[in-house]
Image (cartoon, rainbow, N blue to C red):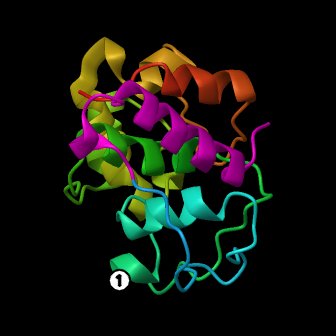
Amino acid sequence: SVTRATFARWLVQTNNRIYRDRNAHQIRLASTSKPAFQDVSASHADFAYIQGLAEAGYLPSSLSGDNTQARFRPNDPLTRETLLLWKVPVDRQQILPTVTAERVKQLWGFKDANRITPLALSAISADRQNGDLSNIRRVFGSTLLFQPQKPVTQAEAAAALWFIGI
């Protein structure tokens, strides 16, 4: 599996390489500022990436008004729903609309849509708009079970990153 910190680093690095000639689409690395998460200090190896994503509003954190996200858990495995929660806003570069589990079930046909956290539902719904280039189709293929808490492998994380945008 891939850790949350590793995927945050890969996401920023890949985005910035794809948009190397388009400065306005790059995610800025954080230098030194008050950490957005209690468990990621400025001395953490991936602080600049994690903090940069949080400061840009791509990660739920106290900076984006989500005071329930005080910890980042950098060494925990990245889950399927977290991959989409972080990646789709980077793809779309906008705030995503709020949706229900029922709407996700209608769009994707996921039998386990009610097991997806409310925060991730919006990203999963918005991902559908990318058709065959959606992260879900590219990474997980045709599936009727999303399995939101299943850890993501390094290969799956890489597959999500080969395309950024809409």
Q: Secondary structure under badge 1?
A: loop
Residue 74 image-quadrant placement = bottom right
Q: Is residue 143 visible?
A: no
Residue 97 x, y percent position in the rendering: 19, 56
> Does 32 appear above or below 141?
below
The N terminus lies in quadrant: top right
Residue 132 image-quadrant placement = top left
In the image, 158 versus 97, the foreground residue is 158
Residue at 54% x, 53% y is 115
In the image, the segment drawn in magenta is 1-27
Q: Is residue 159 visible?
A: yes
Residue at 56% x, 77% y is 32
Amino acid at dot 1: Gly
Q: Which residue is mark 1?
A: 65
Residue 140 x, y percent position in the rendering: 55, 21
Residue at 53% x, 69% y is 31
> Does 53 appear above or below 16?
below
Residue 45 image-quadrant placement = bottom right
